Image (spheres, rainbow, N blue to C red):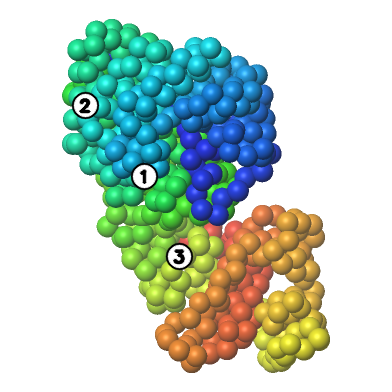
Amino acid sequence: MTSRVYIFDTTLRDGEQSPGVSLTVEEKKEIARALERLRVDVIEAGFPVSSPGDFEGVKAIAETVKDVQVAALARANQKDIDVAWEAIKKAASPRIHTFIATSDIHLKYKLRKSREEVLKLAVEAVKYAKKYTPSVEFSAEDATRSDWDYLAQVVVEVVRAGATAVNIPDTVGYTVPQEYYELIRHLVEALKEAGLYDRLESGEVIFSVHCHNDLGLAVANSLSALLAGARQVECTINGIGERAGNAALEEIVMALKTRRDYFERVLGKPLETRVDTRQIVPTSQLVSRLTGMTVQANKAIVGANAFAHESGIHQHGVIMHRGTYEIMDPKEVGWTGSAIVLGKHSGRHAVRFKLESRGWKLSEEDLSRVFERFRQEIKDVLRTVHDEYLEGVLLDEFLEDEYRYRVSSAYVSSLYGAPLKPLAQVEVLDKATGAHRAVTVGVGSIDAAFKAVAMALGYRFLGSEDRQPEGDKDLRLVHFHIDAVGKGTESLGVCGIVIEDRHGHRSAGLGKDDDIVASGIKALVNALNRLEAYRSKGEELKRKLAEKAAA
């Protein structure tokens, strides 16, 4: 039996059946191209007979991708199969995937047919599909709730009819790993008894598994089935799909790769896919963006926190050797950047690591000063601390006397339901040039206030527009965050911002006040002070601190 595991991606069929997801033909083609770069073996492009739009989507995908097989779903009847073939006939490698339910509950209440009738329909569908293409897959819907002996009978007959892949779906996420293992073994034995095992052993026929996640066991069940002899896994990017979703492609692939040793020990050879794992995160992010289905932060492999470390103990371990707390290299799945995340649990090692990554080398004494200020001013205020905030704390500690700007007064007005836009009027003191005033309007109170402060000091504030800063006084808003410390309407308002100049240098500011608009103004002025201090004294300070650290 082959050690190759085929990845059958059904993101564009089962995944698109997720509530609230509706992709255009162009979006489907974009995802299909990403799946081709990911090097999946099969793309199930859709269910062509279900709608004209689905037909066009499947047809477009079949004509777009070349280095991957394209499958179309069809019920076990001639019309569905005809339409499926019409949609995929121009594919470089087409597959018809036909299905019918085999569980008694489906036969009685949905199909209203006997076991004999369903068996006949299954065999006829496979034979009919074989007239179009040699690659025909048969699925026994709700297989895990079917009578095992009857299911075995169906499997044997569809293999005799010419099916090249036989899928045993856990359609409602009902089974558990050991039971699923035993079911696949039961079906393997059935082929042996029928004299068909040579087809399985040679790879002419493969067992496939399609697991849903209703009990959170889709990936575990899929891996268990592979141990039992299945060699194709049907899965989706990010695990999206009906109800609780499907087995997640990224988890299946990385489990096989990371625990190659286990599968080799149990089976005598490792199980391998052809997937380019470096494309996993880019593909995940594309699917998330186009479907509108946000990936939860703690999602394995592709979640924002999958390789993030905030605990001081973990951060120290990872800084010393990544293998202490990481079983995979994040670059291997397409992540870039540092895994160290600053937060309330971070320790001195993480602070040193982050500062050194930005070019700052500190003595133990200076590190202690910065860490204590960081601990007091930021750790319990911001949930996640951008690196720029930490650099800002360092500048506060050593260059605060150099800060130029201070808001002496600000007036902001905003009326709910009024035809007039929010208005801000500010006076800002510059140590070098004196008092400056400005009046502006904005789309909201904070927007008006930010624009007024920027105008008063001669900056051009681009907000969050995509335009890049061009002049030394151009600033782009990179990050904006507001929160509350405490409960109720009298909570302390916290605002954090990150701005960027035309040279790509970023500066962060934090503001706290009972009034959220005032906290926003304080955050902006804080960021501007840090930016100007860095521009005038930053490199000199870096050199002095590095010399002190080396002494």
Say if 104 sits above or below 232 in the image. Answer: below
Q: Is 193 placed left or right of 453 in the picture?
A: left
- The tag earlier along the polypeptide, 1 or 2, is 1
- Please name the residue that numbered disc 1 is placed on: 109
Relative to residue 477, is residue 131 drawn left or right?
left
> Circle 3 — which element?
loop
Separation of residues labelled 1 and 2 (CA atoms): 21 Å
Asked if residue 180 is positioned above or below residue 500 in the image, the reply reads above
Name which of mark 1 and mark 3 comes first in the sequence: 1
Identified by mark 1, the residue type is Tyr
Which residue is nearer to you in this view: 3 or 216? 216
Instruction: Identify the residue at image location x=27%, y=27%.
Output: 151
**Where's the N terminus, which quadrant?**
top left
The secondary structure type at the circle numbered 2 is helix
Q: Give the class, few, some or many, for how many residues have Cα within 10 Å of label 2's Cα (few <14, many ≥20).
A: few
Q: Which residue matches tag 3?
A: 384
Q: Distance between the residues labelled 1 and 3?
A: 52 Å
Q: What residue type is labelled 3?
A: Thr
Task: Report crowding for label 3: few under 14, some 14 to 19, many 20 or more residues within 10 A (C-alpha).
Answer: some
Q: Which residue is tagged 2?
A: 149
